Amino acid sequence: MKQSGVSQWRKLDNAALAFPAVTGKKDTRVFRFYCQLKEEVDGERLQEALDKTMEKYQVFQAVLRKGVFWFYLEHREMRAMVKEETQPPCSRIYIPDKKSLLFEVSYYKDRINFEVFHALTDGTGAMHFLQELVKNYLQIVHREAGLPELFEDGKVTEKDLEEDSFSQYYNSDAPRIREKKEKAFQFKGEKHEQQDMEIAEISLPVKETLEKARSYGVSVTVLVAAMLLCAIHEEIPRNQQKKPLGLMIPVNLRNYFPSRSMANFFGWIEVRYHFQQNTSFTDVLKEVKAQFEAELSKERIGRRMSELVRLEKNPLLRMVPLEAKTLALQAGTALGGRGITAVYSNVGVIRMPKEYETYIRRFGLFASTDGLQLCSCSYGNEMVLGLTAKIPGDSIRRNLLSLLEREEIPCRLEENTFPGQRENNRNAVRKFFETFTFICVAIAVVCGMVNYMLNDHLSWSLFVGAGCFCTWLVVTVAYGKRRNILKNLMWQLLIITVAGLLWDCFTGWRGWSVDYLLPLASLVVLCSMLVITKVKKLEKSEYLFYLIEAGLFGWIPSILLFAGAVQVTYPSVLCGGISFLVIVGLFIFQRKEFIKEFHKKLRM
């Protein structure tokens, strides 16, 4: 189904599949692309520009939803709002159960920021969006200047923009890649929290950098990659210098397979180097160049891409529930990361019509990381290196600057101000939760001590401890699922039902858990969902599947009744009848949405 030419929902591309599984407080999987102007940014005009940009890139107007087997993107009529920058760079954008857009546009002084969760797009997609946004903003602010449109490459449809190019170019007959990776050097020890991530930006002149690269017979990407390897090597402890250094280099697959998709369409190569005692910078350059040439053939890139897509299309893996897939993806990411020391991503040249040079100072980007990452891009005669690190200290940055100076490449360390960075984000809610947890444990322990001192054994204190645990679990789940009330209700129903059954069982079975608790709790949850749906005016995609879940759960008391496990019948009859009517009503009156929701959630 389409809305304004945009698919109402679509599956994640192959590269995006892992991002929802591995994102978290340690690495938000968010990257920032920004444009620094030669004038202060007007927030109201920027909002106007964003509204206009979203008309072209409606593909970004999506939220991340969770199915039974896969995550998927769902189109939402939500207005993207501009805000003044107040949060640390690359803060979390995707938060489970929070139905919000997967990107943010903010501004600070003369800087326009575009931050995006990597499951939505890659560096190329983000670059196109920011170019359009900046173009629209400057056209609005400087109407009298008659600024031109961007370079267009023909008519692009919404289908082109949301295309899954991985599936488009997947070759099932591509030979498999069999290679064993050697474990690379890893940064150990304490790491910064996300809000304390080190960010350094180094500005280089494109002309001199390009001349230096050509003098060595290499590309700028190879030159910078070799410098990063050398900068890291200088900080490796002597007892770990036998391990190689490994760099992951993302590769824009659009350079090999034509695509206009705004979804992710990138692969990567891995460059490794064993440093010896007498290794020179020229030695590193030659080896990195050789590995680039070997890995960057279209055949090799295509085989690696098809290898990853083959896993996604495996019929057995497709049938594995999402929760199990998530664990496997987390394990696979951790295992694959053992061969990587750092990441270097070069987005390349950002082109704008010449008329915009009067207003634009530079473009830059950097990314969230759980270790060390370098990003780069260039505009005009300025190349910006964005180095982010969770590793304490500035030694690698210092080494990189020294290498640039040694190679006689003019460089400048930029002084940037990021509002919100290094602020104490430990909020009152977290403190309350920690205090509540301690109180629950303390009550259970104190009651156990009193019980044992009075009776020389534990009896009633066990039930107090169980009650404390149940209370803690209910509150914890309620807090964790607070962003999705309907999902919260289903979890609470499940917890209360299981806790009631166990309590009834261990206190001498009287049947109250199945006679009263199970049917009445199911009814309360089902009726609450109906009321919440009406009051909050939720969209069908937000409530339909949860109503179906609650309705099906409400059939359990009837099943137990027919199985002879229930003594008091009227609660179970009432619950089963109402639940059945809800399911039938949804199917009759919202059949199309009913079937579509199952199709989305159960897509393998």
Image: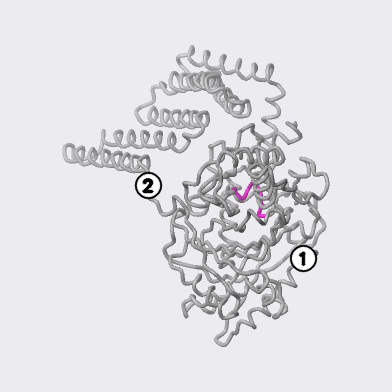
- From this viewpoint, which residue is outermost toward the left? 454
Given residues 118 and 562, the one toward you in this image is 118
* Residue 393 falls inside the magenta stretch: no
Check disc 1 and report its element: helix, strand or loop.
Answer: helix
Residue in the picture at 50% in, 70% down: 397
Q: Which residue is mark 2?
A: 426
Q: Nearer the viewer, residue 513 or 340?
A: 340
Amino acid identity at mark 2: Arg
The magenta segment is: 116-123
Q: CB under 8 Å between callouts 1 and 2?
A: no
* The quarter of the displayed image where residue 578 is located: top right
| 71 shown above or below 579 | below
Instruction: Give me the disc on residue 300.
Output: 1
| Mark in front: 1 vs 2 | 2
Relative placement, left or right, of 31 versus 299 is left
Quarter of the figure with residue 68:
top right
Secondary structure at numbered mark 2: loop
Q: Residues within 10 Å of mark 2 (few under 14, many from 20)?
A: few
Secondary structure, magenta segment, majority class:
loop
Where's residue 344, x and y in %? 61, 65
Relative image position of residue 393 (x, y in whole percent) = 43, 67
Q: Image point 68% across, 16% down: which residue?
A: 589
The colour style of the image is: one colour
